Image: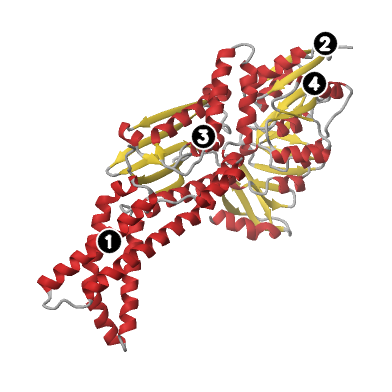
Amino acid sequence: MAEQKAPSISHSPGALPDFRNLGVIARTLLAVNAAAFAAAIARGPDAAAVAAQFVEIASWVEPALFACLVVLYAASGALARLRYAAGYAVTVLLVAAVSTALAIVQARYVRATAPAALAHSLVFAPALAVLLLEYFRLRSRAFSPALAEARLQALQARIRPHFLYNSLNAVLAIIRRDPKAAEGAIEDLADLFRSLMADNRQLIPMREEIVLCRQYLNLEHLRLGGRLQVQWNVDEAAEDALVPPMLLQPLVENAVYHGIEPGMSPGAIEIRLALEGDRVHVALSNPYHAEHQHRQGNRMALANIRERLQLHFDVEASLEAGVDAERYRIDMLMPYRKAP
Amino acid sequence: MTELRILILDDEPHARERLRELLDDCRDEVPHVVSGEAANGPEGIECLASSPADVALVDIHMPGMSGIEFARHVQLLASPPAVIFVTAHDQYAVEAFELNAVDYLLKPVRASRLAAALKKAAAGARVTREVLERVDPHPRRFFSVAERERITLVPVSDVLYLKAELKYVTLRTREREFLVEESLARLEQEFAELFVRIHRNCLAARAAIRGCERVSGDESDAGWALLLEGCGEKLAVSRRQWAQVKALVRT
């Protein structure tokens, strides 16, 4: 099923980069300045001349560059709502308009002459915008196979076969005695697998991810009973945050597998979702069992989530994991994007 | 045909319940009685002491002591139960079972498969200790000592040193000593992470090492004795092992 769907990913038109993202802004600054430097080299015969040329070019380029970034930052929400082609065109037009306007202002009030820079703004700024948009499109496409892969992996490894078979076994155990509870458990299982097999490319509200985790934990409760304790601590505002799908569930599953199952006595998983300024903080912890060391699956899940965070939030998201005071802790930070 | 006495060992209550149901379903085919139920290895061994069983249905993946380790310990009994392993998904174990022709059941278990496995066990199919060691190369969590038809479990982490004496190995804990019928060389291999050889006939727990003391010894001794926490004895260190032991004392 996943194979059949995979081609649709490469044909997808893609999405505009998030102009509010630090990574996108940094990449744009770097690229435009590199282009300015290249132009300076092309014009100047020697090092001194190149430096002078660069200063001259920069004095035209930097104000326009910053103005464009500010305008795109402000328009980012509106642009994201447009279809890709329309958003693309509006972005390029905005860049052309802003840089030309700035060139006109600069030529009239700051400098006496109106040099060729005016024409340059009209040609180079939109050209650079197109190049950068293409770069961002290719970049996100480069991540897409990883996403398709991630979905397959999710099916094979994320929900551990161990969990599936044990859950089915637990359902079989209650089916004669408590058919109602068995029905509920099978519904939870169905929802869980539906989410796993869904197209996992779009961001979803954290709320949905929480529901999924609760369904998953219901099933684990059925199996582990009182050995599994869960403490949720959810900031209401954090429920609206947009997050990559299957962000929390694999981590919670790891917490059960490595933190609760190996323990002879009951253990607690703590899940905290909070809004800290303009960032969402996800903190998860579980008891640590040093002797239960085969953490291969855990590393895979962490690497996969890191990759998806990077794709969606670039450098603005982080994920850290470690052992502290007998508990294994995971901390994730990502920018707060409110769900519509 | 006499009734087969069956022990059910699984850490999940629903999984035990399910096995009981399935056993009920195949009662006509294989007459039996459930002689005990336990949630972990040590409990299961306790259970066998008070009510012996002919067959044990044992989950592999349990906290504290794996099902395979449980099977290794019960081999010390004069008439150990036939062990049938049950697992939801454990690729390693399943491969090892296949390789060594050990019978196992996959969860969810089918009544027909269960009945067939019980019949085979009743007919005398047994796994040997050697096969179990091959199947699960992980170090055990417990040593087991057979005392008057009872098995006493000694947590590996409680043992301060292991000393070879004739055909036995002495285990020394803070409280007392135990004799086990094992080879020191194999113990050294199995527990390389926890114990260090300090003498031809002795392994000491790395975590218990507290220091060393000069003593006068014979030719082969290094002239140093090792001090362990919770134990008044001084253990002679051989010249050959001294360099390695010295490094441990320092750190």
Check whether the beta carbons of the residues at disc 3 and disc 4 lie within 8 A of each other: no
Judge depth for marks 2 and 4 and give the one in front. 4
Distance Cα–Cα, label 1 vs label 2: 83 Å
**Residue B39 visible to an observer of this rendering:** no
Secondary structure under the numbered disc 3 in the rendered image: helix
Q: Is residue B139 above or below residue A231?
A: below
Q: Residue type at mark 1: give it.
A: Val
Q: Residue at x 54, y 52 (%)?
A: A145
Check whether the beta carbons of the residues at disc 2 and disc 3 lie within 8 A of each other: no
Please count the marks in the image: 4
- Judged left or right of residue A35, residue B112 is right
Judge depth for marks 1 and 2 and give the one in front. 1
Are the residues flagged by discs 4 and 1 from a single subunit?
no
> Badge 3 is on which residue?
A195
> Badge 4 is on which residue?
B112
> Badge 2 is on which residue?
B28
* Label 3 chain ID: A
Q: Residue type at mark 2: give it.
A: Asp
